[in-house]
Image: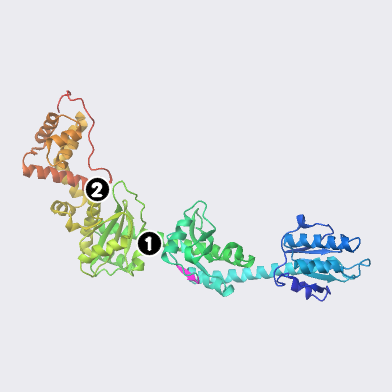
C-alpha cells in the first residue's frame, strides 16, 4: 500500500521530512502528480500527493509568503495527502515561507534532492500500486479457495463467515435470509426483531444498502441474489456504515456475498425438494396408500410413525390475504420449537403433520402460539394414533378449516370435534361420498335450474340460512314471499322432501352442506341472492 511512510522510507528517493503534518503517515495515498499552478485545488482529489518545484513561489519575501500560504491552503482544502518540494539550482533549499505555511496548515512536507527527478517518485508509487494489486489478487484467490472449501464441505453460511472472520477479524457480520432468519452471526448480535426488520428492508424496491437498527446502530447490507433467478435470497449484514469500510473490507464482503448466493441456492433447492416430497406424502395419505409406505416417508421427515400425531390445516379467512404466512415460515416456527413435521401447501392451505404425545387440550394452545400474530385460521384433527388414522385426520383438519374460513369472526383455532354434530358426520366422509350425498337430493333441482333458468337451489339455501323465516328469506332474495313459497313447493315436488317437516329439512340441509364440503365452497361467500325478477313473473 502506498503511504507517506513508504515513500519516506524508500532509500532510492532520499526524501527528507521537513514537516510531518497532521496526517497519519500510514494512511493510503491515492496517487502522486506534479503541478506548478498557483491554485491546483480544482484538479486535486483527496489523498493525492502533490509534487512541485515551487515555480509559483516568486518575488520578494512578502510575495513568496502570500503565494506559499495560498498554495498550501489550496492543498489543505482539497484534502491532499502532502507536498513534495523538488529542489533545483535556482532554489537549492525549500523556501522558509513554504515551511511556515505547511506548519500552520498541518500539511506534510518532504524535500526531494536536485539529483532525483519527480519520475522516480511516480515510478515508486506505480511499483507500490502494482504490488498492492498483486497482493489483493492473491488475497482474493486465497479467499476464493477457502470459501470453495467451506461450501463444498457443507459448512453453510457459518462457514462462509468463518472464512471472512479469519481474514478480517475486526468485522462484525451476520447473514439474514428473506424470512428474517439469522442462520449465522459473527459478532453483530441481531435479535429476531432485527432479523425481521432486515427482511422487511429487502422487500423494498430497490433494497437499501444501509440500514439503522435502533440500538444496534447502522449496518451495511450486501445483497445475496438467488442463483439463476431474479430476486434477493438473503443479505450479508456488516456492522457500521459503508463509508467506514476500507476498500479491502468491501472486496472481502462482496466476495463472501457471492459465495453465500450458492449456499442460498442450495438451501432453496433443499426446501423445494422437501416441499415436493411433503406434497407427495399428503397425496399418499389422502389416497389410502399402504401404511408401510407412509411410515417410511414420515421417518424421512423425522416423524416417528408409531407416535400419536396431529394434523393442522392453516389458511386465511374467506376474502382474506392468502399469503399471510408461508410453508417456510411454519417450518421455521416448528424448527425453533424442535418439533419435526411434514409441512406442505395444498389447495390454498398449509397442511402440517407433527408428533403430539401431550394431552389433546394443549394442542390448541400450541397451534395458537405457532401462528403468532397472523390472522389465519387453523383447523385441527383429533390426535391420530396409527398410520391408518391419518387419512380421516387429514379430512377432519381440512373440513374444520373450511368451516372456520367461512365464518367472518369467531375462534381462529378449533378442533374438528368442536364443530357440531352435522360437521362431525360430514367430515368423516371423503369428497366422493359427500358428492354422492349431495347429488341424491340436489341433482333434480340443479337440472330444473339449468333447464328453466330457475333458482331453486339458491332459494333453498337462503331459506335454510335464514332459519326457515319466510319474510327474511324473501327480502334477502328480493322476491315476493309467494314467489318463495312456490319455489319451495317445487323443491318438494322434485325431491319429495318438504321444508315444513323437520326430518326433511335436515336431509336438505345435510345435502347442501355435503355439497359445500365436497366442492370447497367456503372459498366464496356461502350464499348469494339470485337474479332479481319482476314480481309479476310466472312462479316456477
Q: Is residue 287 left or right of residue 503?
A: right
Quarter-wise, where is residue 293 in the image? bottom left
Residue, disc 1: 274
Across and down, in percent, residue 34 comes to: 82, 61
Count residues near mark 2 (Cα–Cα under 10 Å), then give few for <14, some for 14-19, many for 20+.
some
Quarter-wise, where is residue 252 in the image? bottom right
The mark found on residue 53 in the picture is none
Across and down, in percent, residue 458 comes to: 19, 37
Disc nearer the start of the sequence (2/1): 1
Across and down, in percent, residue 262 comes to: 51, 63
Count residues near mark 1 (Cα–Cα under 10 Å), then give few for <14, some for 14-19, many for 20+.
some
Q: Nearer the viewer, residue 62 or 521?
A: 62
Residue depicted at 16% across the width and 33% down the height? 474
- Asked if residue 467 can be seen in this view, the reply is yes
- Which structural element holds mark 2? helix
Residue, disc 2: 406
Residue 185 colored in magenta in the image? yes
Q: What kind of secondary structure does the magenta stretch mostly adopt?
A: strand
Residue depicted at 91% across the width and 70% down the height? 92
Residue sitting farthest toward the front: 62
- Which structural element holds mark 1? helix
Q: Which residues are magenta?
A: 183-187
Amino acid at each position: 500500500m502506498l503511504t507517506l511512510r513508504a515513500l519516506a522510507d524508500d532509500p532510492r528517493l532520499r526524501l527528507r521530512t521537513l514537516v510531518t503534518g497532521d496526517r497519519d503517515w500510514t494512511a493510503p495515498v491515492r496517487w502522486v502528480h506534479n503541478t506548478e499552478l498557483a491554485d491546483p485545488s480544482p484538479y486535486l482529489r483527496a489523498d493525492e500527493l502533490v509534487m512541485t518545484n515551487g515555480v509559483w513561489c516568486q518575488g520578494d519575501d512578502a510575495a513568496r509568503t502570500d503565494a506559499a500560504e495560498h498554495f498550501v491552503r489550496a492543498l489543505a482544502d482539497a484534502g491532499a495527502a502532502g507536498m513534495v518540494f523538488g529542489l533545483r539550482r535556482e532554489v537549492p533549499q525549500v523556501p522558509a515561507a513554504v515551511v511556515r505555511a505547511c506548519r500552520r496548515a498541518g500539511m506534510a512536507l518532504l524535500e526531494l534532492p536536485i539529483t532525483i527527478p519527480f519520475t522516480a517518485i511516480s515510478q515508486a508509487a506505480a511499483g507500490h500500486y502494482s504490488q498492492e494489486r498483486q497482493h489483493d489478487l492473491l488475497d482474493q484467490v486465497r479467499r476464493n479457495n477457502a470459501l470453495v472449501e467451506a461450501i463444498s464441505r457443507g459448512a453453510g453460511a457459518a462457514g462462509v463467515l468463518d472464512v471472512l472472520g479469519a481474514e478480517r477479524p475486526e468485522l462484525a457480520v451476520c447473514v439474514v435470509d428473506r424470512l428474517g432468519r439469522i442462520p449465522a452471526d459473527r459478532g453483530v448480535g441481531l435479535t429476531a426483531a432485527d432479523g425481521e426488520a432486515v427482511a422487511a428492508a429487502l422487500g423494498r424496491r430497490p433494497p437499501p444498502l444501509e440500514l439503522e437498527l435502533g440500538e444496534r446502530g447502522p449496518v451495511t447490507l450486501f445483497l445475496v441474489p438467488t442463483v439463476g433467478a431474479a430476486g434477493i435470497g438473503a443479505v450479508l449484514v456488516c456492522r457500521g456504515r459503508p463509508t467506514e469500510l476500507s476498500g479491502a473490507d468491501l472486496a472481502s464482503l462482496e466476495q463472501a456475498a457471492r459465495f453465500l448466493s450458492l449456499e442460498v441456492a442450495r438451501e432453496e433447492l433443499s426446501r423445494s425438494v422437501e416441499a415436493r416430497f411433503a406434497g407427495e406424502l399428503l397425496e399418499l395419505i389422502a389416497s389410502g396408500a399402504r401404511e408401510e409406505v407412509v411410515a417410511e416417508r414420515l421417518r424421512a421427515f423425522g416423524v416417528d410413525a408409531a407416535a400419536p400425531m396431529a394434523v393442522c390445516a392453516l389458511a386465511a379467512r374467506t376474502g382474506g390475504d392468502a399469503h399471510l404466512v408461508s410453508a417456510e415460515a411454519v417450518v421455521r416456527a416448528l424448527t425453533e420449537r424442535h418439533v419435526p413435521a411434514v409441512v406442505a401447501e395444498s389447495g390454498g392451505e398449509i397442511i402440517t403433520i407433527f408428533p403430539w404425545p401431550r394431552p389433546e387440550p394443549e394442542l390448541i394452545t400450541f397451534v395458537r402460539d405457532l401462528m403468532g400474530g397472523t390472522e389465519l385460521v387453523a383447523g385441527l384433527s383429533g390426535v391420530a394414533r396409527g398410520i391408518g388414522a391419518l387419512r380421516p385426520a387429514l379430512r377432519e383438519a381440512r373440513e374444520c378449516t373450511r368451516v372456520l374460513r367461512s365464518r367472518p369472526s369467531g375462534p381462529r383455532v378449533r378442533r374438528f370435534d368442536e364443530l357440531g354434530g352435522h360437521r362431525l358426520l360430514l367430515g368423516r366422509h371423503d369428497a366422493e361420498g359427500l358428492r354422492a350425498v349431495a347429488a341424491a337430493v340436489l341433482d333434480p333441482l340443479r337440472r330444473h335450474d339449468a333447464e328453466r333458468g330457475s333458482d331453486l337451489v339458491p332459494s333453498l339455501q337462503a331459506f335454510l340460512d335464514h332459519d326457515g323465516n319466510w319474510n327474511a328469506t324473501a327480502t334477502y332474495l328480493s322476491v315476493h314471499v309467494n314467489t318463495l313459497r312456490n319455489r319451495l313447493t317445487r323443491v318438494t315436488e322434485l325431491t319429495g322432501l318438504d321444508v315444513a317437516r323437520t326430518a326433511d329439512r335436515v336431509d336438505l340441509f345435510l345435502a347442501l352442506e355435503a355439497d359445500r364440503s365436497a366442492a370447497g365452497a367456503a372459498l366464496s361467500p356461502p350464499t348469494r341472492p339470485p337474479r332479481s325478477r319482476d314480481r309479476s313473473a310466472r312462479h316456477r
